[in-house]
Amino acid sequence: MGEMERLVEQYLKRLVEIRGTGAATDETSYYSALENLLNEVGKTLKPRVVCNGQLRNVGAGHPDFGLYAHTQCNSKGVPKSGQAASPERGVVEVKPVKDSAWQTAKSDQVSKYWKHYRLVLVTNYRDFILLGEDEAGNPVKLESYSLAATDAEFWKLAASSKATAKAQGVQFGEFLRRALIQTAPIRLPQELAWLLASYGRDALVRVESASLPAIDTLRSALEDALGIKFEGHKGEHLFRSTLVQTLFYGVFSAWVLSNRKLPPGASSKFDWKTAAFSLHVPMVRNLYDQIATPTRLGPLGLTEVLDLTGNALNRVDRAAFFAAFDAGKAVQYFYEPFLEAFDPQLRKDLGVWYTPPEVVHYMVARVDKVLRTEFGIAAGLADECVYVLDPACGTGSYLVAVLERIAATLKDSGAGALLGQDLKKAATERVFGFEIMPAPYVIAHWQVGLLLDGFGASLITGAAKSERAAVYLTNALTGWQPPTGPKTKLLFPELEEERDAAEHVKRDVPILVILGNPPYNAFAGTSPAEEAGLVEPYKVGLNKKWGIKKYRMPAMQSENCIRSTGSKPRQL
């Protein structure tokens, strides 16, 4: 049981215990359960948030609770000099379980609190409504969460506290955490990664609890396109987690790119619905279209979560954020912190995606030198005749390093104003990346896009012209030979286009350089014969000759969470 589930179970148990005495008042007797819940949730935040009851009247009445950042509290019990009486994180107004929290939120009493504190959490112990202000300074419902629709249903659920906490603990707990940091400034990449991961966990609960034909269709389409199977509990979790990650990485990537294009000092409201169109990846655009379409993935309710995510991005202190955000280290600054907060076990399982930058740059520099000294190619990787492939590119670290090396060579050769366009040509026509998992595939596109943007050579998307990085969602170990029969038709045209473009690279492009981290455990193939032995040469001498032991992930491997069709498991 996770931390949030445990806290919610304790909250429900305490409410039932109080009610069971038969002497409880409708409202105030239950204060202790709510105060303890908010304080325990507050302990999971930095700085800690403290819930204190019965505030003194400062001209707006007596809110039931005040929410303070721990930095407002003097550990010696003496108020800090000049400390404002107003709680930094808002106030809480509580009503009986049988009352309507929505009606309470509209009351004159709450309106008076809102005018003074600007942030009010209204609750009847089962419904929670967070009232804040919009851009014009008017009251607005920011978020809400309902444990049960009626008081009778609530007490029934509370009596089954463990089951209810398991079903709702993550979403409810994440809502409370976000409510307690609603007014906290968002300045650092790690802070934003945590907040977006909170919305991501909410989205994942919705996706994992849903049974929709559209999800099955999307999974089948990916399996057919890549020649893999998501099997068992872990395989299903990996697929759905990857689906959610793809969405959130896409939103964040688009937000970063849109901000980089703004003139200094300018601001613009970000709309997540435009995210897919700035990533230049047709497959991702199709995914966003499905989520926004009510008859497809719309019933998952992800549009609501992504709307809230967009609002969070619009709260970011952009000047402070981008002063701290190093686009060249995008994976470390966002991808890894997000995955650690979103799904720490999956981050551990998929740790092989990350390669230390020192190793990446050494390998790229070594290849560049060999091309010059042993192949007689004076420009090395920058030569237009050198085609490069990372067959398991993950988040794109090697691709970015190759492009940076090309940019350095072009600069030294006096490319001048043409450097950016020459670099874009390399990124779109001859520096290729293959990746089989959609989430890191999106990050790879993001990283290449950021790099090109930094050189003033942004990719263009439009009716007349559409550009994209040469990174493809494909199985690197299959598709190198033409099919013996008719080519398989895929469920989504975007996936079919992706497959065909990747197969063009595999069959028609004279690849000279292959670098990166090979999939040591022999990944996906549509048939054992096609894949057999392809990876074995990379393993020769690793252990006996050089003492190198490859990283293993027994948990994923033992449960066969993802396997190639008719072949052995892939170790991610």
Image: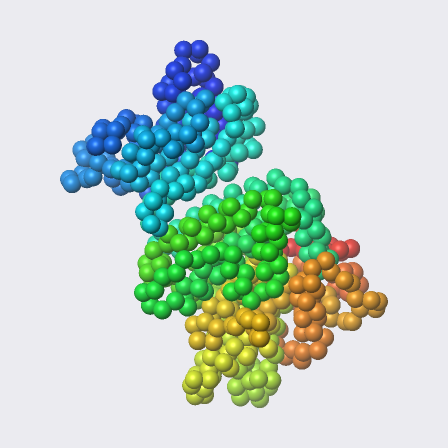
Q: Residue at x 43, y 84 (%)?
A: 417
Q: Residue at x 37, y 27 (%)?
A: 94
Is 540 placed above or below 76 here?
below
Q: Residue at x 32, y 58 (%)?
A: 320
User: Which residue is more in the foreground, 239 or 531?
Assistant: 239
Quarter of the picture holding the C terminus: bottom right
Q: Position of residue 558 (x, y in %)?
A: 67, 46
Q: How is the image coloured?
A: rainbow
Q: Position of residue 520 (x, y in %)?
A: 65, 61
Q: Position of residue 202 (x, y in %)?
A: 51, 43
Is residue 572 at all visible to an observer of this figure?
A: yes
Name the side, left or right, on which 251 lies relative to 74. right
Residue 548: quadrant of the picture: bottom right
Is 347 placed above or below 513 here?
above
Name the side, left or right, on which 100 lies relative to 293. left
Name the side, left or right, on which 308 lies relative to 137. right
Seen as rendered, the residue at the extreme left is 81
Q: Position of residue 382 (x, y in %)?
A: 53, 82
Q: Count up the numbered dots.
A: 0
Residue 31: quadrant of the picture: top left
Q: Residue at x 55, y 85 (%)?
A: 383
Is residue 349 at all visible to an observer of this figure?
A: no
Seen as rendered, the residue at the extreme top is 22
